[in-house]
Image: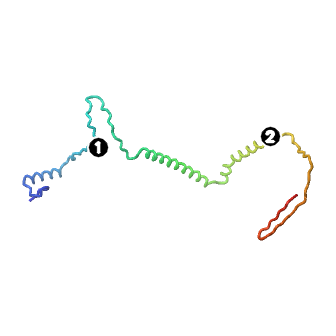
């Protein structure tokens, strides 16, 4: 005796045959079940024009991320990429400096030494050009006195001593 699936009472022969047919059809169906279509969250109920283009309808913009946050994210990606490039460049330079030999140091500093020598020569030439051609002799007029008297006062008290020399 079969019981009705929803009522909990025994099914009649017609109901049992219909349920068996439904179960058999559902079990051995070869085509896909129909896709249920759900309406979108925005529905425009304005009537469409009889001919021509449809007028634009305002559609609300619900973004997950605000525009300022997206801008900051893009800027931080750019800064991170730039810093990574600078770090890679520094790594390459330091790798090159780690394998430095005396010959490479001398060859690397040779242009700077030549530039310093040229700058020194130009500076010396400018200094000689600016100096006067006739040397002036300084003549001092007046009396010169030499005082050779030195007074020495010494004052020692307690832990510290003070000595004062006066030349007069």
Residue at the outermost bottom position: 158
Up-down: is 55 above or below 60? above
Q: CA distance from mark 2 to mark 1?
A: 89 Å
Q: Which mark is residue 41?
A: 1
Find numbered disc 1 in the image and state the secondary structure of the residue it sits on: loop
Judge by depth and name the residue closer to the eye, 155 or 74: 155
Marks 2 and 1: which is nearer the front?
A: 1
> Can you tell which quarter of the image residue 120 is in?
top right
User: Image quarter for residue 58?
Assistant: top left
Residue pictured at 85% horizontal, 64% vertical: 153
Relative side of 122 to 135, left or right: left
The picture places residue 80, in percent across and down from the top left corner, at 50, 49
Q: Is residue 81 left or right of residue 45?
A: right
Q: Is residue 158 left or right of residue 98?
A: right
Q: Is residue 153 depicted above or below 122 in this figure?
A: below
- Other-residue count near label 2 (Cα within 10 Å), few / some / many at <14 / 14–19 / ≥20: few
Q: Nearer the viewer, residue 166 or 47?
A: 166
Q: Where does the image place residue 136, in percent across and percent down from the top left?
A: 87, 42
Sequence-earlier tag: 2 or 1: 1
Element under label 2? helix
Name which residue lies at 52% across and 49% down: 83
- Residue 86 percent across, percent down from the top left: 55, 49
- Residue 31 in the image, given as x and y percentages of width and height: 20, 46
Q: How many marks?
A: 2
Mark sitting on residue 130: 2
């Amino acid at each position: 005796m079969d019981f009705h699936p929803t009522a909990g009472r025994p099914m009649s022969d017609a109901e049992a045959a219909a349920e068996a047919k439904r179960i058999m059809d559902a079990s051995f169906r070869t085509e896909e079940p129909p896709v249920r279509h759900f309406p979108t969250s925005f529905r425009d109920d304005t009537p469409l024009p009889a001919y021509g283009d449809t007028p634009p309808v305002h559609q609300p913009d619900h973004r997950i991320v605000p525009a300022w946050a997206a801008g900051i994210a893009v800027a931080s990606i750019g800064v991170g990429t730039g810093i990574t490039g600078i770090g890679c460049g520094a790594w390459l330079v330091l790798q090159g400096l780690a394998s430095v030999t005396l010959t490479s140091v001398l060859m690397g500093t040779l242009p700077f030494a030549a530039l310093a020598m040229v700058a020194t020569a130009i500076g010396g030439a400018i200094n000689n050009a600016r100096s006067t051609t006739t040397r002036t002799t300084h003549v001092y007029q007046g009396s010169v006195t030499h005082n050779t008297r030195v007074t020495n006062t010494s004052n020692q008290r307690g832990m510290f001593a003070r000595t004062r020399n006066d030349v007069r």
